[in-house]
Image (cartoon, helix red, strand yellow):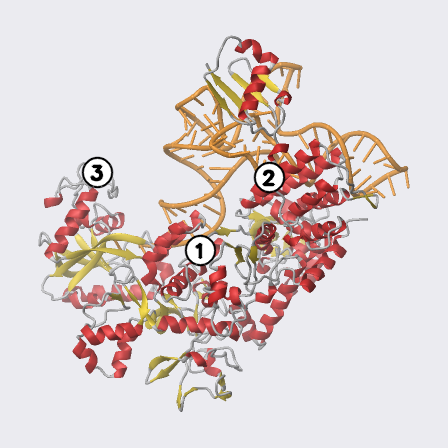
Amino acid sequence: MEYNFKDIENNWQRYWAEHETFKVSNLSKKPKFYILDMFPYPSGAGLHVGHPLGYIASDIYARFKRHKGYNVLHPQGYDSFGLPAEQYAIQTGQHPAKTTKENILRYRTQLDQMGFSFDWSREVRTSSPDFYKWTQWIFLMLFDHYYCNKANKALPISNLIKCFEKEGNITVNVISDSKVDSFSAMEWKSFDSLKQQQILLAYRLTYLAEAEVNWCAGLGTVLANDEIINGVSERGGFPVNKKKMKQWSMRIGAYSERLLLGLDKIDWPDSLKEMQRNWIGKSIGAKVFFKIEGHDAQIEVFTTRPDTVFGVTFMTLAPELDLVGEITKLEQKKAVNTYVLETQQRTQRERMADIKNISGVFTGAYALHPLTNDKIPIWIGDYVLADYGTGAVMAVPCGDQRDYDFAKHFNIPIKNIFKGASIESEAYTDKINTVIDHSDFLTGLQYKDAMKSIIKVLEEKGCGQGTVNYRLRDAIFSRQRYWGEPIPIYYKDGMPQPLSLEDLPLNLPEVENYLPTPEGAPPLGNAVIWAWNEKERSVVSNNLIDHKKVFPLELNTMPGWAGSSWYFYRYMDAQNREAFVGKEAMEYWQDIDLYLGGSEHATGHLLYSRFWQKFLFDIGYVNVDEYAKKLINQGMILGTSAYMYRKPGTQTYVSRDLFKSSDVLEPIRVDINFVNASDELDVAKVIQWQPQFAKAQFELCNGVYKVGREVEKMSKSKYNVVNPDKICEQYGADTLRMYEMFLGPIEQAKPWNTAGISGVFNFLNKYWRLFYKNEVYIVNDIKPDKKALKVLHETIKKVTTDIESFSFNTCVSTFMICVNELNSLECHSKEILSPLTILLSPFAPHISEELWCRLGNTSSITNVPFPIFNKAFLIEDSKNYPISFNGKMRFTLSLSLSLNKDLIKKAVIQDSRTEEYLKGKTPKKWIIVPNKIINIVF
RNA sequence: GCCUUGGUGGCGGAAUUGGUAGACGCGCUGGAUUCAAAAUCCAGUUCUUUCGGGAGUGUGGGUUCGAUUCCCACCCAAGGUACCA
C-alpha cells in the first residue's frame, strides 16, 4: 500500500460531509470551547497560501480540544459586503450579489479541500438579509439609547425624556455631540415635537452630524482614506477635497475609558493592546480659561502640563476656529485671512509633510493670564489641530518643543520656569526630575505636587478644571455606497425616524447603476422599487409607507465594519429568526475562548466590535462586556515577487546580473509563474502575457534572463500569489497543513518558500511506512519495549504542551523525531501507533483518520480522547545516569529526561569518579537543574 | 520622533526558571542500493586551524562559577502611529 493522499483525502472529506462529523450542538453536558477565525472577504482572486495559516492553526486547536473532551464551536462565514464587488459591478454591470456568491463558492471549495473541521451548518454571510436584519436592529438599538456618565452605561432615550420633563438638561450628566443649549423642564415642554427630536438626536449613541469627508467631485462620491493615492482618487485619478456632509456617527468616544480599562481583562497580544491604548489616547490634564482683552469671549485650552502655566508667553489657536475672525485686530485682518485661506487649501498630507516649516500669524489680540493677569499675545498656527482638545493651546516654549520652535522662529520671549534646566538649544520636556521655578506658589514643587496644587487653585478661582481628554474620535457610519447594509431610517419633516422592528430587514433594493445619482445622491437613490414589506407582503415603491403616508428612506449604507462588529454571536444560533442570538445559545457559549486573526485589524474591527459589545452588554442582550478571552495574531505570509529591469523609455529589459549599480533601470513586476527555481525567466511567456510586452527585447546573460527578487506582501496585483490548490494537488492537504505550521512561529510574518516542503512530505511517507512496508500491513500486537514506550510518552508530553502554547512549528519537529526513532527501533506495535495516530490527527487529519480506520476502529478519530503521558516511562533508574565530573564542584548529567532530584543525588554520590572527591565531605546544598548541571555547596 | 516586535549556520528556525548553542527540516558532501535514475537508507555539515586548539547568538560594556537568555548604551530590520498640546 502506498500513501495515496489523493484518495485518502477525497474519501475522508466526503465522509465528514456525509456524517456531519463537525456539526456541534448547543445542548451538551461537555464543557464548551468557542474558537473563531476572522472571517474572510471573498475576493475574486480566491484563497492564497497566506489565508489558511490562521485557519490551520485554529483547526489544529479545535481538533485538539475535541480530543480533550470539549464541545467545540468552530464556525466559518464570509464578510461579504465590500468595495471590490461594487467596483467590479461598476465596471461590468454584474450584480455584486452574483459575483459574491460565485466567489464564496470558490472559497468553500478551497477550504473544503484543506480538510477544515468547520461546522458549516452555522455559516453566516454579512450580506444576507437574515443576517443584516440584526445589524440593522443593533443600529436601531444604538439610535434608541444615550450614554449616562452617572450610571456609566447606555440608557434608553425614554429615560432621558423623563429627565428633561422633570428638570431640563442642566443637571443631567450625559454625553452629547456638540454643545446643546441648556433648557429647563418648562422650556422642554414648550418645545414642539420637531425641536425635541432635534435635541434628542444630539444625545443618541448613533447620531447625525456634520463631518468632514473626502469628496471626489469627479466620481461624485465620498472616498475612504485608502482609496486616495497622492491626493487623487485611486479610481480615475480625480482630485479629492475635504467637504462637510451630514453623516451618521457612532458615539464610540463615550466608551473610551471602558475600552481602555477592558484591555486589562483580556489575554490579547501586548503589542495589539498597546496599539489600542495609543489609539484611544488618554491624556490627563486640565482645561484653563483665558480671558481676552477687550472681548467677552474666553479661550479654553487643554493642557497636560497645567503646572507650567506660569511659563506661558503666547497662545496659539487653530486657524479653522470661528473665534479667530472675532478677535483679530483690524491691522492684522489681512495677514490672518490670507493665512486661514492658505491653510484651508493645503491638504492634510501637505500639512503633515511640512512639519519642519514653522508658520503662523499674530492676531493682534491679547489674552490675560488667569493668575498673573499678564498680557499674552494670541497667534494662530497650523500646528494646532482644530479637532483635538479645544483647538487652542497655551504655549509654554520652555517646556514644549513645538512651542519652543514657534517662539524662536517668531522671536517671542521664552521664560524659563525650571530650576537648573538649560533651555539654550531646546525645550526642557522632562517631567520626572522637574522642580518648578519663577512660578509664584508652585515654585520649588515637583511635577506631581505642582499638578495637584495648580488644578486645585484653577478650580477654586473658576478659571480651570482638571480634565481627561481622549484622542479617539467618534466613528463615521455613513457610506455613499451600494453594496452595504441599508440604514433602517426614514425621514419625516427632515428628521430621521427609526423603522419599526417588524419592518426589518430593510432589504437592499435593485438598481440599474451602481454609481451616485445625477443629483449626487448615493447609489441607493437609483432604486425605482425598494423595500419589500414582509408584514404586508407587498412591494413598496421607492419610499417606505409608514402606515398610510409616504416618506423618503435613508440612502446611505453602513460601513464594512458594521457586520463584523457582532457576527461572532450569530454563529451561536445562526438560524434564529426571533433574535440576533437566542438566550439559551448565548448562556451556553458565553464568549469566544480563542480568536485568531491579523493584527492589521487592531484599531478597526477589533476596537469597533469591543464598542458594540459593551453597548449590547449595557442594554442587557449579552452577558459579558469583552467578547474574546484570548486573541492570537497570525503573521502574514509574504510572497517573493520577481522583477524585470527596463531601460527607461525603451522596451529593452536587462538581465539582473548584467547591469552595474550606476545604471538607472525601472523595475517591473512579472508573474512568478514565468520564473523557475533558479530565477530564470521564460521570456516567451512574458511576450504573450500582456500587450505591453509584445515588443519587448531581452538582454540575456549566458543565454538566460535572470529576474530580481523581493519579499513583500502577497497580493494579486504584485503577481506573487502562490495558490494552495497546486500544493494540495502535488503533496496533499495534510502536507500543506503541516508545512505551513512548520514554517515558523504562528505570530511571525514569514516569506512563503516551498523549498522545504519535501521534508514534511517525507515525514508523512515515513509515518505511513510504520504501518505498511512493501505493500504489506506490518502493525503487530507485540508488547512494545521500554525504549519505544519512552519515545511515545516523551512525544505525548511535548505535543501536548506545544499545542497548548501554540508552538506548532516545534510540535511538527517532535513528530519527525518520534517517527525517526520508532523507525530505527523497528517498532510497529499497535500499542504505540494507536495513540500516536491520535496525537497526529489535529495536524494531519486525513491520514490519521485513514490509519485509525486500518487499526481496526470503526468510528471517526475526531472525538477519541487525547493520550495522557505516563511519567513512569520518563524516569530512569539512577544507575543509568551517565555523569561527568569537571574537577571542581560541578557535575554534568547527560540524560535526556530526569525528574527525580533524589535519584540524581544518589547517582552523583555513587559515581566512582566523584566518590573520592566527596569523601569525608557533607554537601550543604544541592543545586540541581534536571537534565543539566549540578552545583554542590560545601 | 514615539510605541511594539525582532536580530542565532548557506536557508526556515530550536534552545524550559541563566546550565553541553545550532534540535528538527531544507540545501550541500560522501557512501549503500540500482544497468541507470527516482525513491529509500547510512554518515557528515557554525566558522577557523599549524589538528593542540581558537572564535562564535547584531555591536560595546556589566552582573554571574556560567549569559542567546538578566541589566545598561548603541546599531539595524519589520509593523503600527504621528504637529494629540
Q: Circle 1 sits on which residue? A: A602
Of residues B55 and A180, the one nearer the viewer is A180
Q: Circle 2 sits on which residue? A: A798
The residue that appears at 68% across and 63% down in the rendered structure is A19
In the displayed structure, B45 sits above or below A56; it is: above
Under circle 2, the secondary element is: helix
Identify the mark nearer the N-term, 1 or 3.
Answer: 3
Task: Say whether residue B17 is left or right of residue B82.
Answer: right
Identify the mark nearer the N-term, 2 or 1.
Answer: 1
Under circle 1, the secondary element is: loop
Q: Which quarter of the picture shows residue A552?
A: bottom left
Amino acid type indicated by mark 1: Ala
Name the front one of labels 1 and 3.
1
Q: Which quarter of the picture shows residue A280?
A: bottom left
Identify the mark nearer the N-term, 3 or 2.
Answer: 3
Q: Mark 2 and mark 1: span between their CA atoms?
A: 32 Å
Image x and y of residue A905, in percent = 54, 20
Name the front one of labels 2 and 1.
2
Name the front one of labels 3 and 2.
2
Amino acid type indicated by mark 2: Lys
Q: Residues within 10 Å of mark 3 (few under 14, many from 20)?
A: few
Residue A560 seen in this snapshot: no
Image x and y of residue A852, in percent = 72, 50
Q: Residue furthest front?
A: A29
Amino acid type indicated by mark 3: Ser
Disc number for residue A422:
3
Q: Residues within 10 Å of mark 1 (few under 14, many from 20)?
A: some
Of residues A123 and A308, the one nearer the viewer is A123
